Image (cartoon, rainbow, N blue to C red):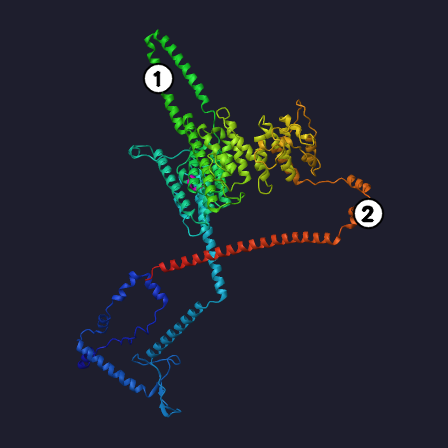
Amino acid sequence: MGKSKGKQRKQVTLPPELPPEITEDEIEVSDEDLQFVDENTDYAGFVSRLDTHSITRQVTRVEGLSEDALEALYEKRRRKALEQKENEKSVVQVDPLDALPVKTLDGEVYYRTFSQIPEVAENEEGNEDKSIVKLTKAERRAKLKRSKKEAKKQGKELAKTEEVQPTQQEAVLAEVKEDLMVEETFETKKCKLAELGMALLADPESNIKSLKEMLQFAKDGDHSIVKLGLLSLLAVFKDIIPGYRIRLPTEKELEMKVSKEVKKMRFYESTLLSAYKGYLQKLLALDKQPIFHHVVVRCICTLLDAVPHFNFRESLLGAVVRNIGSSDDVVRRLCCATIKSLFTNEGKHGGEATVEAVRLIADHVKAHDCQLHPDSVEVLMSLSFDEDLGKPEVQVGNNKMKNKKNKKRKNIEETNQIQGNDRKKGKREMMAKMKEEVAADYKAVAYTPDVEERKKMQSETLSAVFETYFRILRHTTQSSVASSEANGSTAPGASGAHPLLAPCLSGLGKFSHLIDLDYIGDLVNYLKRLASGGSNSDGSAQKVQNMTVSECLRCCIVAFKVMRSNLDALNVDLQDFFVQLYNLVLEYRPGRDQGEVLAEALKIMLCDDRQHDMQKAAAFVKRLATFSLCFGSAESMAALVTLKNLLQKNVKCRNLLENDAGGGSVSGSIAKYQPHASDPNLSGALASVLWELDLLSKHYHPTISTLASSISGMNTAQNQVYLSISPQQAFINLSLEQESFNPKFSTQKSNNKRKRGTGPSTLASINPTSIDENEVSKKLSRHFMLLRDIKENERVRGELDRTKSSLQLYEEYKKQTKSLKHKTKKSKKRLPVN
């Protein structure tokens, strides 16, 4: 018994066998496990550092046995396993899924087996015995894993093919999702902008840091967000910018100890100034991109108009002046309106911005060689100059002299007083010093400069303006001569050759009374050369061409305005300008030239002068009568009004109304009328008769016929009073009346002709049945066909414009979607991959 007990104590139970080793390719790891390991790398990192050999050695060891003995026991177990496998070959084990296991008294669990029945199958190639052998549990598990892995690979390949060739519906759904995402982001950014702007407007000092956050929206990739950001910042800056220029503290001022309120104000001003500077830099950078050009120009013009006194005004003025001659009508009009507002509202900036703007315009005209839009120089017409700046100084000087005399008298009286008044003198001196300091501070804060400063700024402005005007005149003469030498003879009515000449002449006419007397002689020579289009005063043969009739007439008008404003200081002969007017009257064309300019020239040169030479007045009377027969009713009316005015002032010229066989009774030195003479003094108009008035009395317009009849009825009596309007007013009245004028023909004259006429020919000529109905119908059909074609053309053009706009919107939409896709791809690539 004891021996058996000892044997039982020595009996060793080996640990169970480890599961069979599986290759890494057969191991399948789920996506959830991978995600868990990626998220918890700090905790799962030890798995990669495990020593599997030491672990197996620790698991398989048995206490009290050496490694050799343990290896021998394991060898026995392996042999038994091989024997069992050989025995199992003859039997087939029941599938564990189909049957229940059996447990023995020793605690072992096994499945029932049955004897194997061999099945013989004959192949086509040969007879071979095949035995059906059931797979083990580990083999079945490996087989299942392989099948799952193959199924997954097939699923991935199918997914790839579906991604390569997506259906149309999926593509549309993807685009809709992207659009919804873009709209959501746009709405969120828009709401954020609105919140920041409202907070800044409510309390600027507390939320001044939000300006930098709003500036970030101007750097967004979405163009609409950038535009909204720029406009929001514009509204904020217009409201929170103070009414003074911000001066940052110096280093010494920063070292000084100040209160909390001063520190807070300094921080507010420095933050505002830096944000404003960044905003302007962003505007100037975006101005080069055509997408933002309109928005940027609107922001710059609004800022310059609202806060011209604030810092960085030079940058705003430079941007506005650069766009003042733009080919875009909207941009040009906006910039011109801003400059005009600066000129008219000098109280906002004290006149400093006016001087800077005029200088920039002068440099701009010089840089572009006078080839700009006329509006870029026409803005100078909005300038206003104070001519009474020196008058208050006389009164101030007189007051100073009186005060000095009163002080002397007081000093003489005070010497006789007691010395106890020294304290009062000290107090008075202190009060005077205080008043001077207060006046100096008020002067530094106020925008209104002193009289001397205003004089200085006005003289600088005038010099820049006249520098621009004289440069345009010199360029016109030089370019015209050069073009005529290069191209030979060009058409005198070429349009667009001198775009800045018309506004330049208008400005010279307005500011002619402010021109320095030293420059008037040169100015008159330039105007004479431009108006004549012929030889210079020096006798050279160079000719100024490409001048229209309207421009030549403007030169004559400006010359007379300049001479009349400086009549007391100058003595210049204007005979050459009368000669040019005499020749230009017949070169006038209603559709090509401006009738208002001709009417103004007639008024200033002929009507406003008190007296004319008899030969010259008669020549203009005859030329204007001939002119009235050739052109429209408005031009004829202006010419007849001028003709009547000349006859009223020159009584001897009324002899032209007589019907002598050899002409008028006063023929003068020239006995025969020469209508083609270029000089009015050599035309011999006194030897002719105004037979044109008889034709004009039968004019279709009743106003002209009435005026011509009244002129024909004038007699040679001197003491007569005639009331007449100016040629300009007559031209305007008749041009407006001509729009609604409908000539009426009297039926009495036609009836008298019928009575006087003899024979059937006269009746046939008047009979309405002689009208060809076919011709009338053809003309009416052509007329209505033309109207229908015009309407159809307008409709087609409207549809074309709509399709163009829709195509542009679609292209912008595609560009935005492409940019968003590109950004999403970039963001996905940038994500970290573990």
Quadrant of the snapshot with the C terminus: bottom left
Dot 1 alpha-carbon crowd within 10 angstroms: few under 14, some 14 to 19, many 20 or more: few
Residue 447 in magenta?
Answer: no
Q: In the rendered structure, which amino acid carries the disc numbered 2?
A: Pro
Q: Was residue 319 drawn as part of the magenta stretch in this picture?
A: yes
Q: Earlier in the sequence, mark 2 or mark 1?
A: 1
Q: Residue at x 52, y 27 (%)?
A: 564
Residue 787 image position (x, y, % from top left):
65, 51
> In this rendering, is residue 158 above or below 627?
below
Task: Please state which of the two labelled residues, at mark 2 or mark 1, is closer to the viewer.
Answer: 2
Mark 2 Cα shell of 10 Å, populated few (<14), some (14-19), many (≥20): few
The N terminus appears in which quarter of the rendering? Answer: bottom left
Q: Outermost residue toward the top?
A: 416
| Res. 638 visible in picture | no
Residue at (65, 40) in percent of width and height: 739
Q: Secondary structure at mark 2?
A: helix
User: Relative to residue 657, is residue 94 depicted above or below?
Assistant: below
Q: Which residues are magenta?
A: 316-320
Q: Name the foreground residue: 362 vs 132.
A: 362
The image shows a total of numbered marks equal to 2
**Which residue is label 1 attached to?**
429
Q: Name the chief secondary structure element in magenta.
A: helix
Could you tell me if residue 536 is visible in this image? yes
Horizontal relation, residue 134 to residue 728: left or right: left
Q: Secondary structure at mark 1?
A: helix
Q: Quadrant of residue 459?
A: top left
Task: Give the residue pinned by disc 2.
Answer: 760
